[in-house]
Image (tube, rainbow, N blue to C red):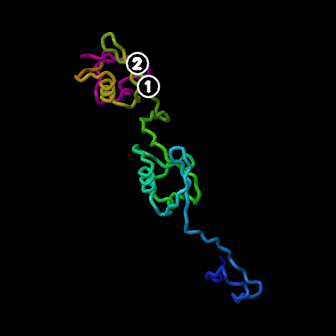
């Protein structure tokens, strides 16, 4: 498409009919077609889908899940990046003919924060049994007690002791001198 002073010219018109002056400069603008196609891998099959650029990602995902009888949580991925379901394809700069993958949503797991915060191992002795708990040194004794209960299934109150002192539930492990591989005693 050609423009003269921001006017669109008819592509069927002959240049001489446009009343152009000699040496006139024209800006050539490629007009986007209204069709917006995506190539999507669904259950291992590549399909071509025509969608509206302003359509929200979750809407297309829902349509695909119904059409392919998928009954588990899914995510739409472009270049290994998960698309935001509540945003449109246009908002996420997805171009026509982009290749996307509809896959099972990756399970969210607890991440171990190791950058800037080193986790320590605390050994908890319960009689003859010893369990190891991985925890941040900035965690409170109360956090440690909760982790012990989760790991052992203990459902009663107990006290923890370190270096012959009872631990305060509200102070951090570091504040009470507990470092990596320290042994704490569980008292019933």
Question: Looking at this rendering, what residue extends furthest in the top direction?
Answer: 128
Q: Is residue 37 magenta?
A: no
On the image, numbered disc 2 is attached to which residue?
182
Q: In the rendering, at what x and y percent does residue 74 appear?
A: 44, 46
Q: Which range is magenta?
A: 161-188
Report the side of 32 relative to 63 (left or right): right
Can you say whether 183 is above or below 73 in the image? Answer: above
Front residue of 6/50: it is 50
Residue at 29% across, 23% down: 153
For the N terminus, the image quarter is bottom right
Please tell me whether mark 2 sits on a helix, a strand or a loop: strand
For mark 2, does the 10 Å Cα neighbourhood hold few (<14), some (14 to 19), or many (20 or more) residues? some
Tell me the residue at 42%/36% (across/down).
109
Residue 45, position in %: x, y?
54, 47
Residue 59, horizontal then vertical, whole percent: 42, 56
Pointer 2 with pointer 1, Cβ within 8 A? yes
Classify mark 1: helix, strand or loop: strand
Q: Quadrant of residue 19?
A: bottom right
Tell me if 109 is positioned left or right of 155 in this view: right
Residue 120 - label: 1
Tally of numbered discs: 2
Quick check: 114 left or right of 99? left
């Amino acid at each position: 498409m050609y423009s003269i002073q921001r006017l669109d010219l008819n592509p069927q018109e002959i240049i001489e009919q446009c009343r152009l002056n000699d040496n006139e400069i024209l800006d050539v603008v490629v007009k986007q077609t209204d069709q917006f196609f995506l190539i999507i891998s669904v259950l291992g099959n590549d399909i071509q889908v025509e969608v509206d650029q302003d359509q929200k990602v979750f809407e297309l995902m829902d349509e695909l899940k119904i059409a392919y009888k998928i009954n588990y949580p899914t995510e739409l991925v472009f270049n290994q990046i998960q698309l935001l379901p509540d945003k449109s394809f246009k908002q996420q700069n997805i171009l026509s003919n982009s290749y996307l993958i509809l896959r099972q949503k990756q399970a969210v797991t607890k991440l171990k924060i190791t950058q800037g915060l080193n986790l320590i191992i605390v050994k908890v002795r319960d009689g003859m049994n010893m369990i190891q708990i991985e925890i941040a040194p900035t965690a409170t004794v109360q956090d440690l007690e909760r982790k012990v209960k989760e790991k052992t299934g203990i459902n009663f109150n107990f006290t923890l002791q370190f270096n012959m002192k009872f631990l305060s539930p509200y102070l951090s492990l570091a504040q009470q001198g507990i470092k990596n591989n320290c042994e704490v005693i569980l008292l019933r």
